[in-house]
Image (spheres, grey):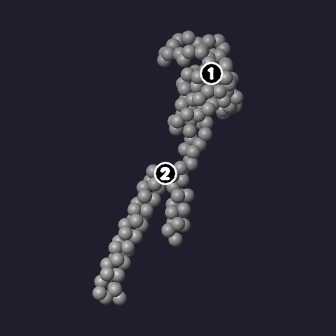
């Protein structure tokens, strides 16, 4: 009974979180992506090995298209530009002009914080109940009437 309750709770409390990398983080690895074809980038959940061949769905001039990281960085400078830098190559660095906050690279499934709290509360209650039952059993065994 308890096992099925915990399993149901875990399934209900399971959330999928998208892990992404920012365009700015990709810009920091342009030389490495060009030479090696991959780079270890920082994501919202640690590190991720990003391939230059990885493609993303983006919108350019109002039309949606699928482009690889290699295409997005093709005209980007090797050194990350400073904020407000007026330099713009022709053709432009598509990664600099993107409005995407994060490119989704992977997703993770885990228990939501609320579900974790409920599971910990239930396990704590089970532990306390077991402890009380054990103590009550010892008291009954030692008593003269054996708790009839």
Q: Horizontally, is 118 left or right of 54 in the view? A: left
Report how many numbered discs are placed on residues in the image: 2
Front residue of this view, candidates 84 and 75: 75
106 lies above or below 37: below
> Few, some or many C-alpha atoms within 10 Å of disc 1 (few <14, some 14-19, many ≥20)?
some
Q: Horizontally, is 125 left or right of 1 in the view? A: left
Q: What residue is disc 2 on?
A: 112
Position of residue 148 measured from the top left corner of the image (x, y, whole percent): 35, 88
Front residue of this view, candidates 132 and 144: 144
For residue 63, say whether it is visible. no
Front residue of this view, candidates 114 and 128: 128
82 lies above or below 38: above
Report helix, strand or loop for mark 1. helix
Q: What residue is disc 1 on?
A: 32
Front residue of this view, candidates 13 and 40: 40
Position of residue 37 measured from the top left corner of the image (x, y, whole percent): 68, 25
66 lies above or below 96: below
Position of residue 108 measured from the top left corner of the image (x, y, whole percent): 57, 45
Q: Residue at x 50, y 16 (%)?
A: 82
Position of residue 51 measured from the top left corner of the image (x, y, whole percent): 66, 29
Q: Residue at x 56, y 41 (%)?
A: 18
Q: Horizontally, is 90 left or right of 81 in the view? A: right
Residue 33, by quadrant, is top right
> Few, some or many C-alpha atoms within 10 Å of disc 2 (few <14, some 14-19, many ≥20)?
some
Residue 62, by quadrant, is top right
State how far apart marks 2 and 1 are (Cα). Answer: 36 Å
For residue 141, say whether it is visible. yes
Q: Horizontally, is 67 left or right of 117 in the view? A: right
Q: Among all residues in the image, which is located at the extreme left? A: 144
Q: Residue at x 51, y 55 (%)?
A: 13
């Amino acid at each position: 009974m308890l096992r099925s309750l915990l399993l149901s709770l875990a399934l209900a409390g399971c959330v999928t979180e998208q892990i992404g990398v920012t365009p700015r983080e990709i810009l920091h690895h342009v030389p490495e992506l060009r030479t090696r074809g991959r780079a270890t980038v920082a994501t919202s959940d640690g590190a991720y090995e990003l391939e230059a061949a990885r493609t993303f769905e983006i919108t350019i001039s109002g039309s949606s298209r699928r482009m690889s990281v290699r295409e997005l960085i093709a005209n980007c400078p090797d050194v990350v530009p400073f904020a407000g830098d007026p330099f713009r190559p022709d053709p432009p660095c598509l990664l600099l002009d993107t409005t995407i906050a994060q490119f989704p690279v992977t997703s993770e499934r885990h228990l939501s914080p609320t579900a974790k709290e409920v599971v910990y509360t239930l396990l704590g209650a089970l532990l306390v109940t077991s402890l009380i039952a054990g103590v009550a059993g010892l008291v009954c065994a030692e008593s003269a009437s054996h708790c009839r």
